[in-house]
Amino acid sequence: MKIGIFPGSFNPVHVGHLAIANYLAEYEEYDQIWFLITPQNPLKKRNDLLDQNLRLNLIEKSIEGYDKFKICTIEWNMPQPSYTVNTLQKLRMLYVQDSFELIIGSDNWSSFHRWKDYQIILKNFKILIYPRRGSDRIFINHPNVRLCKGAPKIEISSTFIRDSIAQEKDVRFYMPLNTFEEVVNTGFFKPEPPVAVESEGENVL
């Protein structure tokens, strides 16, 4: 099978993730798209992440009934922090009958040179870049890398959702059905209440 590896923290998963993956599954001739849930992104702070089992549960609910979507948690049992180059190599060893392509956004492509052993990824795996803001200005000059120009540009981010929840905004339509309430109920993204501090000095009448 031809499998597209769609890595991310999915913190939390939202309709943008699903719409992009759906487009790629249907229009880029992938047999399956695997949501690779990263336990820790080397470029992100760990304490900003929802519990990985909750993130897994949210994706399971979101993709139920669509056979082209699968979940991959292979990195959960690998040394941390997780690096994509190690993950791709392990997947190739475990699933020798399948071919894997890495799927990343154009925003991640701009920092791809910072990834561990990115030259090894370029040499041994194909990469599909889906458009994000500014993707019309990215430069690609490698036979294993291509830009999916037809994919919709969906400017929804997990950061936006986290910030909105912290501000007590109702952004339920940015997330799959029945997942928004579950994230809100965790209270994870709500700001800590201010700590009252007794002042010292003069009394003000």
Image (cartoon, grey):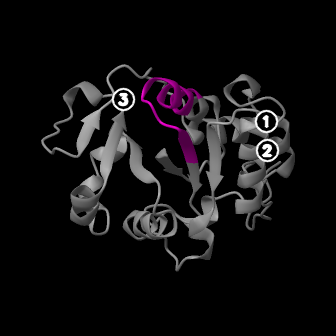
Q: Which residue is mark 3?
A: 131
Residue 64 on the magenta segment: no
Q: Are marks 2 and 3 in contact (CB under 8 Å)?
A: no
User: Is tag 2's residue or tag 3's residue first in the polypeptide sequence?
Assistant: 3
User: How many dots with numbers?
Assistant: 3
- Residue 91 locus on image (x, y percent): 48, 64
Q: Nearer the viewer, mark 2 or mark 3?
A: 3
Q: Residue at x 70, y 32 (%)?
A: 66
Q: Nearer the viewer, residue 198 or 139?
A: 139
Outermost front residue: 97
Q: Residue at x 72, y 27 (%)?
A: 171
Residue 183 disc label: 2
Q: CA distance from mark 1 to mark 2?
A: 5 Å
Q: Which residue is mark 1?
A: 180
Disc 3 crowd rating (10 Å Cα; few below 14, some 14-19, many 20+) is: many
Q: CA distance from mark 2 to mark 3?
A: 27 Å
Q: Which amino acid does the dot numbered 3 rest on?
A: Pro
Q: Nearer the viewer, residue 16 or 157?
A: 16
13 on left or right of 203: left
Q: Which amino acid does the dot numbered 2 rest on?
A: Val
Q: Nearer the viewer, residue 27 or 187?
A: 27
Residue 177 location, quadrant: top right
- Residue 80 locus on image (x, y percent): 52, 77
Q: Are marks 1 and 2 in contact (CB under 8 Å)?
A: yes
Say which element carries label 3.
loop
- Residue 105 locus on image (x, y percent): 39, 39
Residue 21 disc label: none
183 on left or right of 27: right
Q: Which residues are magenta?
A: 19-34
Disc 1 crowd rating (10 Å Cα; few below 14, some 14-19, many 20+) is: many
Disc 2 crowd rating (10 Å Cα; few below 14, some 14-19, many 20+) is: many
Q: Which amino acid does the dot numbered 1 rest on?
A: Phe
